[in-house]
Amino acid sequence: MAGKAKRGSRRSLARPRRGRAASAGRRSARLHESLDQFRLAQDALGVVTWIWDIEADRVQWYGDASRLLGLAPHSFSGRFVDYLGHLHPEDAPRARQNFIECLKGRRPQYRMVERVLWPDGGVHWLETYGRASYGPDGRATRVAGVIKEITELKREESARVKAEKQLARVFDASPEYIVLVRAGDGMFLAANPAFERVTGYRAGEIVGRTVNDINLWAIPGERVRFLADLRKDGMLRDRPALIRARDGKMLAGMLSASLFEHEGEELIISIMRDVSEAKRLERRARQSESKFAALFENSPEPISLMRLSDEVRLAANSAWERVTGHSRDRASSRPATAMSLFPDAARRRDLIARVAAEGRVSNVELRLVRADGSEFDALISGVCIEVEGERCILWNWRDITAQRRAEHDRRDADARYRALFDTPRDGMLTLSPRST
């Protein structure tokens, strides 16, 4: 019995040991599971954590900080001084000072955004967070921290800030008037300088008031129709609009608008282009074109237009056709050399080069040739102008053949008279009627 009791007691003692081992195994499994979940959370959040036991001067890292510094895996020493060596020179002093203040208890926890310089020259952004624990004497005994890369976030933030600045510059510098209003009641939230200049309203006096308060829409009920159409597609382009300036003057324009939501409110940004001014300029341009066309066609002197880049004759007037004997319909849209008036090609090239270089020439005398081969004297002028973005030469010349012939005949007559007067065989006396 005694033997049986002893064996039984040994069996009873063995069971608790096996139970304790199983319990320890379960705890170990749960610990590993917790660690795995912790690592998964770190990877998902892109963070690396660390704990510094100050008394033992031992840093325990959870995750590899090397990748945050652009280093080979597991090559970072983990020392704070080495971490500072990777920071941007402008950020390192501030990071060191914050860490010292945390150790001394003046700043129990800190949060910073720092730039690190990768070996490849790239600049990356890290967000760091640290918190210290202190002993009875107020000295730090332990510091724990988290490091996270936020480079992409900083780039997005920088792009957003840049875009906002660019939009602000466009808003202020736009020659077209822009307003931001609340859709529901038409309250002004912003107006650009162009709107102020054209309408006479200052932004400071209309922000907080509605479009109905200042009676902006000139046509009754037009804003209601405008808002209904805008809500169909969320956007309108080049809608004819008529608004009333502060002095009562009506302003015609083409209105484009976009409907969007911001912080739970429907807002409208509207851009209006002043078409009344554009129409005035268009009328002036048409008048100028009409005047030029009338002058071009009805001039008694030959005029032609040649494109400089390829020397294609673009147009010629009726006087050019009459004097040269060439058909202007056939001459137009063809190289000017196909029906050239210059018997001397080198002289023609020199004259074109001079106009292109100096911008104009005036009253150059030379010989030209008609379609039938007859030559005549001419005074030619040319000026560079721009037509539809192309440099062209506008030629203008007049036939001086009769003038030169008359001058030649007069010189011949003078020469014959002098020859007759200077070499007489008999005496010659010139008398007036009164002297006889």
Image (tube, rainbow, N blue to C red):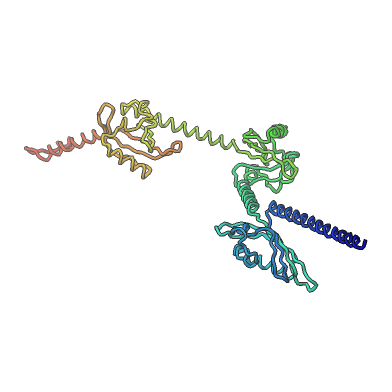
Residue 201, position as x, y percentages in the image: 67, 44
Does 223 appear above or below 6?
Answer: above
| Numbered disc total | 0
Q: Residue furthest bottom?
A: 137
What x and y, as percent, mark residue 157?
A: 65, 51
Is residue 376 depicted above or below 355 in this figure? above
Q: Quadrant of residue 218?
A: top right
Furthest residue in direction right, as rendered: 1
Q: Is residue 345 left or right of residue 111?
A: left
348 is higher (above) or lower (below) than 6: above
Residue at 78% across, 56% down: 25
Q: Where is residue 133, by image quadrant?
A: bottom right
**The one of 338 and 261 positioned closer to us in this rendering:** 261
Q: Nearer the viewer, residue 92 or 414?
A: 92
Horizontal side of residue 5 vs 58, given as left or right:
right
Say which quadrant the N terminus sits in: bottom right
Q: Hey, which residue is sitting farthest left in the picture?
A: 425
Instruction: Identify which residue, 352 or 118, lies in the foreground.
Output: 118
Residue 403 seen from this side? no
Foreground of the two, 346 or 284: 346
Image quadrant in which the C terminus is located: top left
Q: Can you tell which quarter of the image residue 79 is in?
A: bottom right
Residue 317, given in percent of the width and then of the height, sits at 38, 29
- Can residue 47 be seen? yes
- What residue is rendered at 40% in x and 31% in y? 296
Q: Is residue 68 above or below residue 312?
A: below
Measured from the top left, where is residue 119 in percent x and y? 56, 59
